[in-house]
Image (cartoon, helix red, strand yellow):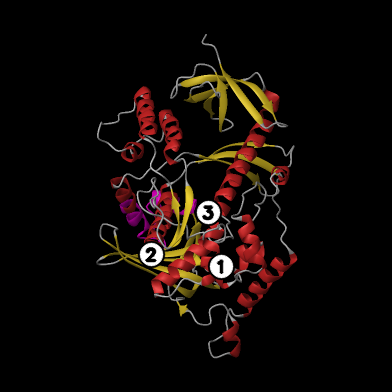
Amino acid sequence: MPTTRIIAPAFDFSAIGDELGLSVDFPSYALAEAEAALAAVTAAQDVPPTDPVWATVPWADRDDATGLALVSLDQAGAREIDQAFQVERTSAGFLLHVAVSDVAALVTPGGSLDTEARRRGQSVPLPGGSVPLHPAVLTERAASLLPDLLRPAVLWRIELDDDAQVVDSSVRRAVVRSVGSFSYDEVQRSVDGSAELHPSLAALPELGRLRQSAARDRGVIALRQPEQEVRELPGEHRWQLSVRRRSDVDDWKAELALLVGACAAAMMLEVGTGILRVVPEPAATTVARLRARARALGVTWPLEAPVGEVLANLDQAAPTTLVLERAAGALLAGATYAAFDGEPPAATTHYGLGVPYANVTAPLRRVVDRYATEVCLAASQGQPVPEWVREVLLSLPAVMDSSDAVVRQVDDSCVDLTTATVLASRVGESFPAVAVRSADEEEHGEVFIEQPPRLAACTGLLDPGTHVTAVLTTADPATRSVVFAQAEPV
């Protein structure tokens, strides 16, 4: 369960978006295009193929996959649903179907929506409402894979053996109808209570665990750090600062997305055109520093054990785990996108995953997914990559890297503003904390405060992994700064 601290709304998060030039408003032509897409999808919900209207709908010439019992798994109340899936246990292993919203069926290449999406790059979360990649009429209605509605989709079919290794994969355009939507929390409660899962989810725990085991075998860097978030309490105009710890169901669902992304990357490399998510191998000195940090924290690290194995075996309840996983983030520095049309890039692997990987499962929130998916569709069907994709592909890494930086900045600023506001009246108070990082010549050390949940700057001779008392010295909402000082031992 998340730890929370509720506060009154003495500030406006929109100022953070304004500072970065973010706008929730869309050009009128883009809005008109989105409305037209919704009208076409809505009008065709129950149109039989014999009706002349059929020729105008987004699924006129695609496969009928409405017989699949696809379900979605997301945060409670989500309406922007990119994916729905069905996992089946077979005599040979597993059969996985993943339907992904076919945004390209509703967005005209080079049109107003496409142009605006490429300018934005991705959705930017803000408390009280995100700055979306597309208008809500598209992401929450026309293109969202909401239950009981016909929707154009890109359908991945992946066969796996008994060890959950890929035997075959393909992707095609289809029309689908999700039969249900579940939240991570409710599925986790069912798993914990040994309750019966929906048939389309029944094999998820087994497949998820097998994929996690395979990931550990190839040295995947799986960081399960708690996520700091700022959320509005429904109907109360109040905010909560929370730390949400990942559940098993979160991780199993993530394994499905990673599986699709790995299959997509393989297709792109085979045809020589695509865009990969690349993370370079860290320098030996970076790994050596992490090993030294583990040794200082009393964490056992056998000489030949890869870093992924060590991180996977950490006790999630131990304060030293937070410290080591925070430090391990340096292993994934330098993440970027690599586009190619001809020779593949020199580096194709995502170091954290141990395989080539591509983003294709969140087209409602990232523009790159729509273009990458088109390459995979062409590759799977033996067709040439559309020219409108090739014209834009090589420019997408700059778009995505820039928008990634904006997302990180907005996220940090929102948490900083919330925390500074919560703590503004408590300067001078002492807080129990865990030392996360010691100070160096350039910046303060870092501690984790449990209430309100916060990673914060802290002065003093911190010993990472130990419980300390931190005294709040600065909490300024105007500058969004929060600083603690380690209390002198009594």
In the rendered image, residue 198 lying in the magenta stretch gets the answer yes
Identity, as a three-letter code, of the amino acid under mark 1: Val
In the rendered picture of this protein, how many numbered marks are placed on residues?
Answer: 3
Point out residue 475 in the picture as x, y percentages from the top left corner. Answer: 67, 26
Cα–Cα span, label 1 and label 2 = 20 Å
Task: Identify which residue, 122 or 158, lies in the foreground.
Answer: 122
- Kindly identify which residue carries mark 2: 267
Residue 30, above or below 13:
below
Indicate which disc, 2 or 3, sits on the residue closer to the N terminus.
2
- From the image, state whether disc 2 or disc 3 is nearer to you: 3
Q: Amino acid at mark 2?
A: Met
Q: Quadrant of residue 196?
A: bottom left
| Helix, strand or loop for disc 2 | helix
Q: Which residues are magenta?
A: 184-210
Image disc number at residue 160: none
Q: In screen coordinates, is 368 left or right of 474?
A: left
Question: Which residue in the structure is indicated by mark 1?
Answer: 103
- Look at mark 3 in the image and give the residue it sits on: 397
Labelled pair 1, 2 in contact (Cβ < 8 Å)? no
In the picture as drawn, the residue positioned furthest to the top comes out as: 490
Q: Is residue 314 above or below residue 378?
A: above
Q: Secondary structure at mark 1?
A: helix
Q: Position of residue 307 (x, y in %)?
A: 33, 37
Q: Which residue does the image show at 47% across and 22% down from the upper left?
A: 467
Is residue 95 a member of the stretch shown in magenta?
no
- Taking the spot 42% from the left edge, 63% from the top edge, the residue there is 342
Q: Is residue 457 visible?
A: yes
Q: Quadrant of residue 259?
A: bottom left
- In the image, residue 63 sits, relative to residue 472, either above or below, namely below
Residue 398 against residue 34 in the figure, above or below: above
Separation (CA) of disc 1 from disc 3: 20 Å
